[in-house]
Amino acid sequence: MENPLEQFEIKKIIPFNYEGVDLSFTNSALCMVITVTFLIFSFALALRKRNIVPNKGQAFAESVYDFIQGIIGETLGNDGVKYFSLVFTMFTFIACGNILGLFPYSFTFTSHIAAVGALSVLCLILNIIFGVKRRGWRYLRTFFPEGLPWIMAPLIVPIETLSLIAKPFSLTIRLAVNMSIGHIMLKVLGTFIVAMGFFGFIPLVADMCIIMFELFIALLQAYIYTTLSCVYLSQAISDEE
């Protein structure tokens, strides 16, 4: 049986080193470029002619917009409109990256902690920036809520700091692990299709069912990641202590 973890191996397409730093263009980077390019051109194509009675492409694009608007409305309220571009980009990038990984010979970059972790850390940094911009120095109350006695500061401040740092970590692990497990199952069952000969139709049917389930998981995990990110953003910009 082939190693099911080989599908997660990052391979160099264009090797490049600069002063000892590996800046090679890899299969992971290629799939990210494909994802971003597909999103830009597909939405540009769908919305190039906006009609009162939308066609199929426009209707799909508008449904995605409405879906993201619903997430923002539930988590950020009316003030969340200004963050629409960030949330929309986050959801579509992760969802398309998850789905792209289901195609043969592609690469699931959302299964790598480094890729997802970089996005999660970026979201954390933006949350801090937005929080400081919205609340000013009162943002520091995130680490020590108002009303607590100052004698508890040595205990509360480290706990709240760790809690803040743990947010991108939890987002990363949740997404990467879920995408990895599903692809490992697909790979394992795929090896049995040929190995079992005539009875290979059994793992084939199971593989097809898992692919359909993985498609659902791909969209679900994008939704969960986006929703939790919006919740964390809401906590950062909230005026309530």
Image (tube, rainbow, N blue to C red):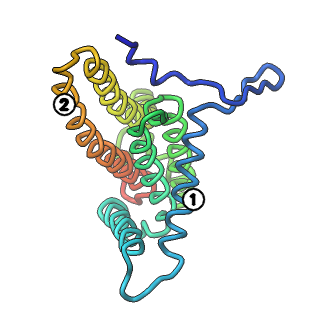
Asked whether 192 or 176 is in front, the reply is 192
Residue 150 in view in this figure? no
Type of residue at label 1? Lys
Considering only vertical position in the picture, is 86 above or below 107? Answer: below
Image location of residue 231, percent across then percent down: 36, 51
Residue situated furthest front in the rendering? 198
Crowd band around label 2 with a 10 angstrom C-alpha radius: few (<14), some (14–19), many (20+): some
Quarter that holds the N terminus: top left
Which numbered tag is attached to residue 240?
none
Asked whether 104 or 41 is in front, the reply is 104
Query: Is residue 147 found left or right of 18 in the rendered image?
Result: left
Is label 1 in contact with label 2 (beta carbons under 8 Å)? no
The tag earlier along the polypeptide, 1 or 2, is 1
Q: Which residue is mark 2?
A: 206
Considering only vertical position in the picture, is 127 above or below 171? Answer: below
Image location of residue 123, percent across then percent down: 51, 46
Report which quarter residue 163 is drawn in: top left
Q: Please, what secondary structure does the residue beneath circle 1 have? A: helix
At a point 48% along the width and 50% down the height, the residue shown is 93
Type of residue at label 2? Ala
Which numbered tag is attached to residue 133?
1
Query: Is residue 202 found left or right of 153 in the rendered image?
Result: left
At a point 41% along the width and 75% down the height, the residue shown is 58
